[in-house]
């Protein structure tokens, strides 16, 4: 049980896919302007991460590895993720059309969100069991959610700030993202010391 807690907390705070590993930057910068869009995208990413892990881990373990087809991992994982994103898009379009419309082009971009592909591949590379992989995927999704919501708050504060002309737009957004990322460095070593 302690192992699951360590994996979860590490995925959320220390190895945050957006702020520490710099994966999933496209939706992080593109959809974080409004809180409802950021939260909606994050929930969709959490769902896709969990479902992708639930499908790709058995494929890798029971199909690719025993048949020496590990070199097909990236292609197979991308196809699985693309199918899952299509499923999410269909569900959102049918049941939550306002969220589907507000996410716009960023929803299909979950297919190319390297955080989703990264979590599935790193679960295999870290040698996690199926349960550990699911916990890591959920923690990674929560970390993505935390980063998106935090940065949405930062960006809302930037809108009312008096920013020099040279930094307006993308430059101040990137500076704010880097400062937000730096704030997560303070968590390094904390989790290991809690359970040591």
Image (cartoon, rainbow, N blue to C red):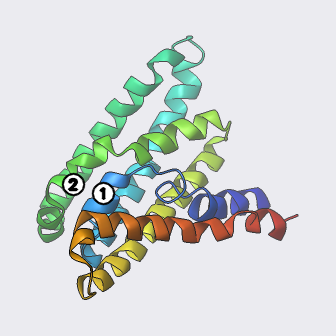
Q: Is 35 situated above or below 119? A: below
Point 33% across, 71% down: residue: 39
* Mark 1 → mark 2, Cα distance in angstroms: 7 Å
Point 51% across, 13% down: residue: 69
Q: Considering only order in the chain, which callout, 2 or 1, is on the residue closer to the N terminus?
A: 1
* Picture disc at residue 168: none
Point 28% across, 38% down: residue: 83
Counting other residues with Cα less than 10 Å from the Cα at mark 2, is it few (<14), some (14-19), or many (20 or more)? some
- Is residue 73 visible from the viewing direction of this image? yes
Point 54% across, 56% down: residue: 20
User: In the figure, is residue 92 to the left or right of 3?
Assistant: left
Judging from the image, what secondary structure is the residue with disc 2 in? helix
* Picture disc at residue 27: 1
Which residue is tagged 2? Answer: 106
Question: Badges 1 and 2: C-beta atoms under 8 Å apart?
Answer: yes
Q: Where, quadrant-wise, is the N terminus in this rendering?
A: bottom right
């Amino acid at each position: 049980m302690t192992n699951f807690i360590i994996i979860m907390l590490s995925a959320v705070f220390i190895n945050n896919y957006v702020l520490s590993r710099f994966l999933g930057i496209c939706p992080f910068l593109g959809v974080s302007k409004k809180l409802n869009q950021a939260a909606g995208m994050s929930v969709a990413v959490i769902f896709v991460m969990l479902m992708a892990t639930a499908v790709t881990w058995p494929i890798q373990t029971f199909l690719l590895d025993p048949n020496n087809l590990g070199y097909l991992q990236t292609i197979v994982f991308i196809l699985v993720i693309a199918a899952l994103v299509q499923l999410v898009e269909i569900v959102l379009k049918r049941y939550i059309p306002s969220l589907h419309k507000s996410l716009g082009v960023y929803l299909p971009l979950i297919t190319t969100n390297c955080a989703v592909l990264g979590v599935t591949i790193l679960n295999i590379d870290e040698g996690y069991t199926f349960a550990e992989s699911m916990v890591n995927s959920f923690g990674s999704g929560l970390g993505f959610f935390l980063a998106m919501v935090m940065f949405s708050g930062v960006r809302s504060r930037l809108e009312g700030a008096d920013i020099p002309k040279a930094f307006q737009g993308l430059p101040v957004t990137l500076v704010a993202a880097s400062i937000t990322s730096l704030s997560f460095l303070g968590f390094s070593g904390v989790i290991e010391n809690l359970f040591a």
